[in-house]
Image (tube, rainbow, N blue to C red):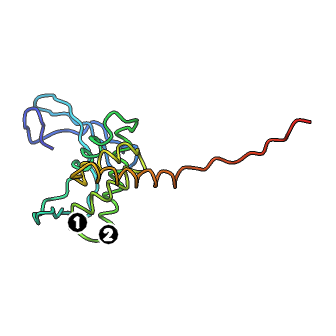
Amino acid sequence: MRCPFCQSEDSQVKDSRPTEDSASIRRRRACPDCGGRFTTFERIQLRDMSVVKSDGKIQPFDREKVIRSMKVALQKRPVTIDVIEKATNGIVRQLESSGDSEFSAAHIGDLVMKALISLDLVGYIRFVSVYKDFRDPEDFKAFLDEVQALQAETKPKPKKVKLKAAS
């Protein structure tokens, strides 16, 4: 592993441990040339995946873009980076287990939306408002009506309690 400080080709692993979700290995490294210390993360990658953009261009899949988009949507919301990482790992696992190597950006966006709606409703609304590129307020209002209907379906209904009359 190349040292990020002096660009030396060699580094020594000082400590290795799995991350909390066991999806990657965290390694503390030291450069024997400059003495700099840094951390690396290693993840399993089953296959090289590509994203087909709406204009037809193909790019390599970048899980960091998924994390960044979720972080932006969840900015100042009570969701930790660990939760975002776990959700991203779930999205990547879904993509890898599909057996395909190319995915449309729309498909990945749909997976991100599904993850966000289970994490934080406000973050979901923020993401969708950018992702769907609403053209006028009526489009956004229709979307919010859908969200409110969905929220009403998933909210637990209060139980009716009969009170006994005092005798």
* Of the pair 111 and 8, the residue shown nearer to us: 111
- The relative height of residue 20 versus residue 48 in the rendered view (above or below) is above
> x, y (%) of residue 150?
46, 55
Q: Secondary structure at mark 2?
A: loop
**The N terminus appears in which quarter of the rendering?**
top left
> x, y (%) of residue 92?
30, 57
Residue 142: image quadrant is: bottom left
Q: Is residue 115 left or right of residue 102?
A: right
Q: Nearer the viewer, mark 1 or mark 2?
A: 1
| Disc ID at residue 38 | none
* Of the pair 75 and 130, the residue shown nearer to us: 130
- The relative height of residue 30 versus residue 43 in the rendered view (above or below) is above
Q: Secondary structure at mark 1?
A: strand
* Of the pair 131 and 94, the residue shown nearer to us: 131
Residue 58: image quadrant is: bottom left
Label 2 neighbour load within 10 Å: few <14, some 14-19, many 20+:
few
Q: Is residue 161 left or right of residue 71?
A: right
Q: Which residue lies at the image location 30% right of the left edge and 50% below the top edge?
A: 140
Q: Is residue 161 left or right of residue 88?
A: right
* Residue sitting at the far left: 7
- List the residue tagged with mark 1: 103
Q: What's the residue type where badge 2 is placed? A: Ser
Q: What's the residue type where badge 1 is placed? A: Phe
* Residue sitting at the far bottom: 99
Q: Which residue lies at the image location 16% right of the left edge and 29% below the top edge?
A: 36
- The relative height of residue 29 versus residue 87 in the rendered view (above or below) is above
- List the residue tagged with mark 2: 98
Is the C-beta separation of discs 1 and 2 under 8 Å?
yes
